[in-house]
Image (cartoon, helix red, strand yellow):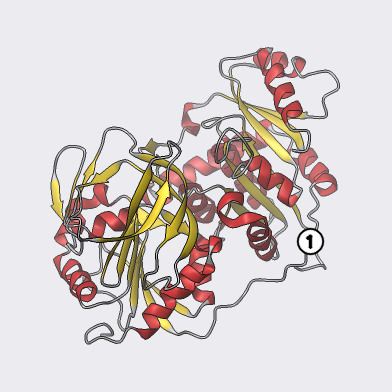
Amino acid sequence: MDNKKTHSAFVIAGAASSSGKTVVTLGIMEALRRRGVIVQPFKAGPDFIDPGHHSALLKRPSYNLDGWMMGRIGVEKTFYRNLPGSDIGIVEGVMGLFDGKDGAGEEGSTAELSKFLELPIALVIDASKTARSAGAVVKGFESFDPKADIRWVIFNRTGSPAHCRALRDAMPEGSRIKVLGCIPKDETLSMPSRHLGLVTSEDISKVTWRRFVKRAARVMEENVDLDGFIGELKRCGKVRSRNLGSKIPPARPRASIAVARDRAFCFYYRENLEILEGFGARLVFFSPLEDDSLPEGVNGIYIGGGYPELYGRELEANIPLRREIKALAMGGLPVFAECGGLMYLGRRVTDKEGRRYDLCGVFPWTSRMLPKRKALGYREVTVEPCPVLPGGGVVRGHEYHYSEISKPPSRLKRVFSFSGRDGEKTREGYLYKNALASYVHVHFASNKAFAEGFVGMCEKTKIEGACK
């Protein structure tokens, strides 16, 4: 880490989901950016959408930090390696401050992260339907875990100056938490959402996006004491370096991996891509929506999650690419597909309106969108011996989707097994030749041998037509 420069960092957490922490985060990021402050963004938990908004705003990669998937050392390495080159690090929380893997402990929570990294917390509370009771909420959060360093509170969606005064007056006597500001209720600060969360930055027009972040920054400037906050942050938010080193440069290229990335496929942990590069993968990006062929000379394909169901017509129309991917997978080219990628490798997808679209057909299933969520939660996956992990092993990841696939034939090999919160055992991780598809988004930091094995497969695979 650059010891010649003082770095500060803090966490923006919510009292609950939908408290408005993303709007507050983006508004503060933009306000600081306008002041010439270099901000390095991070996102707590397994979210893909918020990091995309961070990166679109700051033109810097935003990294996920997840104590359950990555472990404490993994979190620290990612944080300390990526903070240099910035002035302030901002970690946007996930759900409520203490929400994580389950209700019994703090694993995977924003609070756990804040303690791992010894960072102070700004707590965002939706005050739209409360007044003096907000004081009880603050007191409860402060006393629930005294080791979580909550220093500030921002009351969001307030109704009037009188409402703000009531909220300030309700603060518990003797509390160390300071009211940083009151954000007035403003419908123009509501971000559009859909079934997997907020609309991605790729699907918002640049004009609408810029208008939104400018408005958010102006509201923060007008209602939050940013000058006083920055001064306090220099005192209580100074980062203590763990001296874990700087960013690791990509290794000498061993194989070229085509990565699907566009509006339909945009869910990737930034860390995963860098871990692949660290094992010698040369990543080349392509669009299943717009490119009629894969990049030249690829030895493998990585297809992450996203919204293939929203772009079924366009994906179906790209017949040359679908046929090429199927032919290469049938010929043994390594392919790793997660969630939306699993759907894309299937025979077809049926959207919520019942429209059916043909897809790659590597696997025999049809994906069907459901009106309600099918699965959500962390997954600890036992991997049977397979081409990616010849000796087997365990990886951790997260599952979140509104689709289900038709029952695959029993002869189709499954190499993943895991239990959900209800204890029900699931066997998936469908393997056909060297194509592996799962609904689970695996975090490679949980077991880097998985990423190394995939790169090794791509390096060793030499089949006719695999490298064009």
Image point 42% across, 61% down: which residue?
383
Residue 420 placement: quadrant: top left
Is residue 264 visible in the rendered image? The answer is no
Residue 333 placement: quadrant: bottom left
Image point 70% across, 29% down: which residue?
181
Q: Position of residue 36 (x, y in %)?
A: 69, 55
Q: Is residue 218 left or right of residue 462?
A: right
Q: Position of residue 325 (x, y in %)?
A: 22, 70
Where 129 falls versus 342 (above or below)?
above
Where 384 falls versus 403 (above or below)?
below
* Secondary structure of the residue carrying numbered label 1: loop
Is residue 405 visible in the rendered image? The answer is yes
Where 271 falls versus 140 (above or below)?
below
Q: Quadrant of the C terminus?
A: bottom left
Q: Which residue is mark 1?
A: 241
Q: Quadrant of the N terminus?
A: bottom right
Residue type at the position of mark 1: Ser
